[in-house]
């Protein structure tokens, strides 16, 4: 039961801010920060709330309805109607993504084919606006920190233009290690306790730099769905920089539970990171938080600013560490080779926050709360 509180005049703003106290069932994040509250209307003490939900769990709408009614009743609402709608694809081009087209009459809905990877509990995309801020390094380090915390983790290198995960993990002949099943599914490789697949294993001589948008989109969709993942707690997806075709195609292909946005301490990187965060929010992918990478050498503070601007948690800083460059180039991940370094330790904390935001409980072993 919600506690009684002084009655305030109900309006859409007070209702929205009250909904900011209602967590998504099983998660620590609230409905508003997940971008799920689509519309609020108030007439006297009657309130109507429209929520955009993509969940397959049929109990969630009921649980949310109870929590919302409880919260709003404590503010004096006499009748609360909760309407659930399916998130719609963007109806206008995303401001920063010229490749997103408005679906037209008679044109197939590009979201209609979205699937849930049945053997994967949560898919987390790691993205950033700017190139070279350390997305791939963060994706690998986060994945290895999660392994260290007891999770079963996969890594999908979806950077079609510059797949770098095989280098960071020291895989030399990945294309020869990858096997296909009889029905043309890709069997991923195992490395350092991770299950991995990279676009880099399939690119051969062809340069995707000259691929046209639709080819990229088709390749990402096939790739995202075509892997025979074992049972995984978490699948981390490393994305290329920017807000273009690849993140959109990924999110249209598979259900993504949340995104981690990587930025650098400088303000300019922050502007781009914020665009990436806004893109995820518009695609109905909750931004789980912002990581500031290379703190120290380039100052500090930019990540926190981006997190505040996006209204999402700041997950922490990763120090600039000169040795990381060589360790990356030589395929000896810092989180494993120098597990007591500040760099490695920063990922323990980030990993915990990420999985907590997804509703995992961290008491000893990895257990999902819902
Ligand atoms: N915290 C850090 N300290 C020092 N060097 C780092 C750190 N994080 C990443 N680097 C280095 O910065 C370079 C870029 O990192 P990385 O390839 O992970 O970036 P990216 O954002 O994935 O780049 P791209 O946009 O090309 O995909 C690499 O040489 C990497 O070793
Ligand atoms: Mg990269």
Image (cartoon, grey):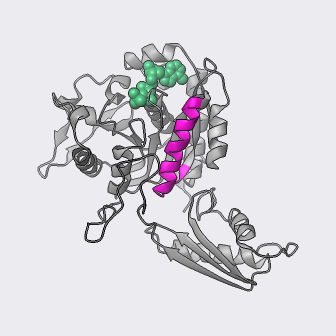
Left or right position of 197 against 11: left
Residue 199 sits in quarter:
top left
Left or right position of 152 against 158: right
Q: Position of residue 215 (x, y in %)?
A: 21, 45
Magenta stretch, residue numbers: 268-287
Q: Nearer the viewer, residue 199 or 351?
A: 199
Query: Which quarter of the rendering shows the N terminus?
Result: bottom right
At 30% across and 33% down in the image, what residue appears? 161
Farthest left residue? 182
Query: Residue 160, relative to residue 333: is it above or below?
Result: below
Q: Position of residue 295 (x, y in %)?
A: 62, 24
Query: Residue 78, relative to residue 306: is it above or below?
Result: below
Query: Residue 64, relative to residue 23: is it above or below?
Result: below
Q: Nearer the viewer, residue 98 or 64?
A: 98
At 27% across and 52% down in the image, what residue appears? 225
Residue 156: tell me if it is visible: yes
Residue 268 sits in quarter:
top right
Q: Position of residue 211 (x, y in %)?
A: 22, 38
Residue 153: tell me if it is visible: no
Query: Which quarter of the rendering shows the C terminus?
Result: bottom right
Q: Main secondary structure of the magenta part?
A: helix
């Amino acid at each position: 039961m919600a506690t009684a509180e002084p009655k305030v005049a109900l309006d859409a703003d007070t209702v929205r801010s009250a909904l900011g106290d209602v967590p998504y069932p099983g998660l620590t994040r609230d409905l508003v920060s997940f971008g799920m509250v689509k519309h609020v209307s108030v007439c006297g003490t009657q309130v109507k709330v429209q929520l955009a939900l993509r969940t397959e769990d049929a109990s969630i709408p009921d649980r949310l309805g109870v929590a919302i009614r409880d919260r709003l009743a404590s503010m004096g609402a006499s009748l609360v109607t909760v309407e659930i709608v399916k998130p719609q694809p963007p109806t206008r081009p995303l401001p920063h993504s010229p490749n997103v087209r408005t679906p037209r009459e008679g044109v197939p809905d590009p979201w209609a084919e979205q699937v849930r990877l049945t053997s994967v509990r949560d898919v987390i995309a790691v993205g950033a606006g700017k190139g070279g801020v350390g997305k791939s390094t963060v994706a690998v380090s986060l994945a290895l920190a999660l392994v260290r915390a007891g999770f079963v983790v996969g890594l999908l290198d979806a950077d079609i233009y510059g797949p770098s995960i095989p280098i960071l993990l020291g895989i030399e002949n990945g294309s020869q290690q990858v096997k296909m099943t009889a029905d043309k599914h890709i069997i991923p490789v195992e490395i350092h306790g991770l299950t991995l697949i990279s676009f880099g294993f399939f690119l051969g001589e062809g340069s995707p730099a000259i691929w046209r948008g639709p080819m990229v989109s088709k390749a990402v969709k096939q790739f995202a769905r075509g892997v025979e993942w074992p049972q995984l707690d978490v699948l981390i997806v490393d994305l290329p920089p920017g807000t273009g075709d690849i993140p959109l195609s990924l999110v249209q292909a598979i259900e993504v539970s949340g995104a981690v946005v990587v930025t650098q301490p400088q303000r300019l990187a922050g502007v781009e990171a914020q665009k990436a965060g806004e893109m995820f929010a518009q695609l109905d992918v909750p931004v789980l938080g912002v990581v500031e990478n290379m703190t120290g050498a380039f100052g500090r503070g930019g990540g926190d600013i981006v997190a505040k601007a996006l209204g999402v948690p700041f997950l922490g800083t990763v120090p600039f560490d000169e040795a990381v460059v060589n360790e990356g180039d030589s395929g000896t991940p810092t989180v494993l080779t120098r597990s007591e370094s500040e760099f490695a330790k920063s990922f323990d904390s980030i990993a915990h926050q990420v999985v907590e935001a997804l509703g995992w409980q961290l008491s000893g072993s990895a257990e999902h709360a819902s």
